[in-house]
Amino acid sequence: MKVFSDQEQQGQHNPSGFLVNGVMQPNPEKPERLERLLAGVAAGGHAVHAPTDHGLAPIAAVHTPAYLKFLSTVYERWARIPDATPEIFPNIHPDRRTASYPLSAVGQAGFHVTDMSCPIGAHTWEAARWSANCAVSATQAVLDRDNVAYALCRPPGHHCFSDLAGGFCYLNNSAIAAQYLRQTHDRVAIIDVDLHHGNGTQGIFYERNDVFTLSIHADPARFYPFFWGHAHEVGEGAGHGYNLNIPLLRGTGDDGFMKGLNEGLNVVRNFAPGAIVIALGLDAFEGDPFGGLAVSTPGFAKMARMLAALNLPTVIVQEGGYLCNELGTNLQSFLDGFEGRSA
Ligand SMILES: [Zn+2]
């Protein structure tokens, strides 16, 4: 399977912290994740390709001009503020439905960053841009002739809305891939198997019926992202019936996960997409530091076989999955499973 990754650009984004229960902790979305995931790719014998720079057009197809201007310029503006921190953290959030758009870097950070897990540093924009380039390059490979390709995206993307960063995510790589597939395919489905609900992806396509969004995740009633990911969120307007959330009880293991996924895939089959994007979080793993679900290493291969059985052109986009000894092995298990090999 073709793999797209740019370790140099993507590795420079190194967020210092995130706020957990009121305490600033080391940020788990570390550059070392790339190394561990690349080790899994190498162990599976997959060829790594450098992504092509596709410019801003595929990114601007799902993100607003104001947000992209903010993300690409705010660091320099913030750095001119006397005594400002080396990274941008928001300290005010508006009621976004009625708020005016501010001119200051501080005000814009509050407008465009939803939580305290997304510090913006000197290299964040370039890393996010190259992460998106990996997604677009993998999508281009699938559109050209590959049946499947894997984008090793870091930073991840599925918590990012059209104009709102959140949950370690700055550009929504899965959404960018799905929108890019729309050039050729009338209907595209995004299948999000990350531990956390893909709230940004849901938000981007919530009123559309050409991109079906399925997310299977730990129940947000007591888990991030809290405000999204509930079963009653089914889409609005033209998008009504084109968003499906399958929340699982905390601690659900392979059997419960596959049962939920099977239900979701039956709905995806009825939608009859021409191609799919898999938002591949590996943090549903039983040993992941977030500890939300309990999927096993062979469980990822099983999950992949179920997804491969859809028999559709597929772009696999890396989302979450945090440092643990099995991180690379879990990726290898998934990729091998997708190709019908056993790890
Ligand atoms: Zn996650």
Image (spheres, rainbow, N blue to C red):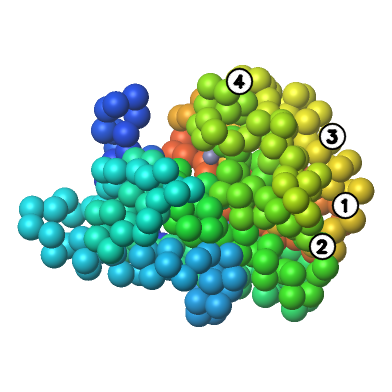
Q: N-terminal of the two: label 4 or label 3? A: 4
Where does residue 83 sit, x and y in percent of width and height? 8, 53
Q: Please say whether residue 52 is visible from this viewpoint.
A: no
Q: CA distance from mark 3 to mark 2?
A: 19 Å
| Residue located at (70% from left, 53% from top) | 207
Count all numbered tags in the image, as a single digit.
4
| Residue located at (61% from left, 55% from top) | 204
The residue that disc 4 covers is 250
Q: Is residue 133 above or below residue 124?
A: below
Q: Are marks 1 and 2 in contact (CB under 8 Å)?
A: yes
Q: Mark 4: few, some, or many residues within 10 Å (few <14, many ≥20)?
A: some
Q: Which mark is residue 30?
A: none
Q: CA distance from mark 1 to mark 2?
A: 8 Å
SS category of the residue bearing label 4: loop
State yes or no: Cβ of the residue under disc 4 lies below 8 Å from any atom of ligand 1.
Answer: no
The residue that disc 2 covers is 187
Q: CA distance from mark 1 to mark 3?
A: 13 Å
- Front residue of 102 and 165: 102
Which residue ends up furthest to the left in the rendered image?
82
Q: N-terminal of the two: label 1 or label 2? A: 2
The residue that disc 3 covers is 263
Q: Which mark is residue 271?
A: 1
